[in-house]
Image (spheres, rainbow, N blue to C red):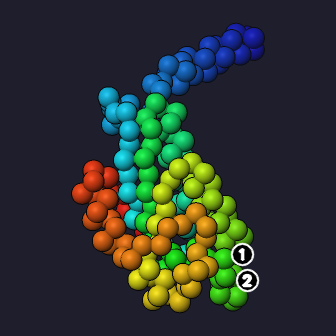
Amino acid sequence: MVKTKFVVMLFALLMMAIPFAQAAKIDDAAALAEMKTGKGVFLVDIGDAKKLAFYLDVIRGTHAGMVKQGVEPDFILVYIGPSVKYLTSQPNEDDYFDNNVSYDKIAENVAELGKLGVRQEICAVATRVFGVKNETVLPALTLVGDGFISLIGWQAQGYHLVPVF
């Protein structure tokens, strides 16, 4: 009797597992159909170091996901607003003390994105407003006059806007 109940329960569990085993592969095939290159310009405007570090990880994952699905990523990141406070080799001491792990992770992600060929721009209007010396921006970044103008230009060249707030 106990053996029969066990066999019935085991059979029921196996039957429930079959739909999971046969589940469709999770990917972006419909959106990426026939695409060879994915052109995206990411508007990055985040005023929290931990959140910025997190989203830079996500963007790296998005880059890897496109490669994995056979699409060449052509990404540009444009940093504006308070994001620029975290993109310097000389951060504010009090802010760095509170966010040192995030600053290190941000710098690591910026460098890794640069190695992947991702263009990264930092807005000179924002560096001025937030007191970041242009000569201290992280090496993988390109200083541009105005991040909004840059975004308009990249979109005119066929890059699709990805806002990151």
The relative height of residue 52 versus residue 69 in the rendered view (above or below) is: below
Report which quarter residue 138 is drawn in. bottom right
Whether pointer 1 and pointer 2 mark residues with C-beta atoms closer than 8 Å, the reply is: yes
- Picture quarter with the N terminus: top right
Image side of residue 30 versus residue 89, left or right: left
Badge 1, how many Cα within 10 Å: few under 14, some, many 20+?
some
Q: Which residue is drawn at 46% across and 30% down?
A: 70
Q: Which residue is drawn at 36% across and 76% down?
A: 146
The relative height of residue 35 versus residue 42 in the rendered view (above or below) is: above
Q: What element carries label 1?
A: helix
Q: What element carries label 2?
A: helix
Q: Is residue 75 visible?
A: yes
Name the residue beneath numbered marker 1: 100
Q: Residue at x 71, y 16 (%)?
A: 6
Name the residue beneath numbered marker 2: 97
- Residues 127 and 57: in front is 127
Badge 2, how many Cα within 10 Å: few under 14, some, many 20+?
few
Q: Position of residue 52 (x, y in %)?
A: 55, 67
Q: Position of residue 154 (x, y in %)?
A: 32, 59
Q: What residue type is labelled 1?
A: Asn
